[in-house]
Image (cartoon, rainbow, N blue to C red):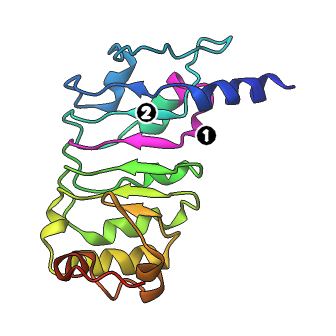
Amino acid sequence: MSVRWDCCKISLQAPPLDYSFRGISFIQDLLTEEPRTGLKVIKRSAGGKLLTQAVRLNNNTINELTDFASTMEQLLEYPDELSWVDLSFNDLSTIDPVLTMYPDLRALNLHGNSIQNLGEVDKLAVLPRLRTLTLHGNPIEEEKGYSLNLSRRLQEQSWPARWDVQTITAYLRHAGGAVIWSELHEKRFWPV
């Protein structure tokens, strides 16, 4: 087996690189800040880079993702295989296009930020493997028809199986988001 394949197997099983609750304002600060330690240690490649496919940056004060790609390249052995990014509870007002540089991204947590424009979600259309997206707790959630519009946008894109911690049912997928989840929930009506 190749060295890359062995490293990829290790990184699939590795815990996330965890910079949560570190008071980080700028992505470049990851290079000088120590990540949180967990029960399981993240292994390093022969070159000293971390072997993981997940990064946790939640509960900080990040308001832009300048230098995200270059920082990931310096920290991770295979940054192009990043599959999970947690940016929840920061101060992001937009979805930075840099996130679209990671085609293996499967989960993106953006809840509890300052995203105001639902059109920002359209940027994620190029992520073919995106399966989980969280946006609740952003100002866009207060927008009239938020659930309906988000359902339609996601159907037009790669259709994550979960958004805002709600599983997308086959019925909602088929209906094209025409039925808002909250309306179904309030009426206790679930199609068979």
Q: Magenta residues, as a range?
A: 73-89
> Which quarter of the rendering shows the C terminus?
bottom left
The amino acid type of the residue labelled 1 equals Glu
Q: Quadrant of residue 6?
A: top right
Relative side of 169 to 9, left or right: left
Q: Nearer the viewer, residue 174 or 157?
A: 174
Residue 57 part of the magenta segment = no
| SS under mark 1 | helix
Q: How many residues crowd mark 1 within 10 Å: few (<14), some (14–19), many (20+)? A: some
Quick one: which residue is furthest to the right in this view? 1
Give the residue at mark 2.
55
Q: How many residues crowd mark 2 within 10 Å: few (<14), some (14–19), many (20+)? A: many
Give the residue at mark 1.
81
| SS under mark 2 | strand
> Can you give x and y, in whole percent of width and height, for residue 119 in the image?
32, 72
Residue in the picture at 36% in, 17% down: 35
Residue in the picture at 17% in, 54% down: 114
Residue 74 part of the magenta segment = yes
Q: Is residue 46 above or below residue 24?
A: above
Relative side of 61 to 14, left or right: left
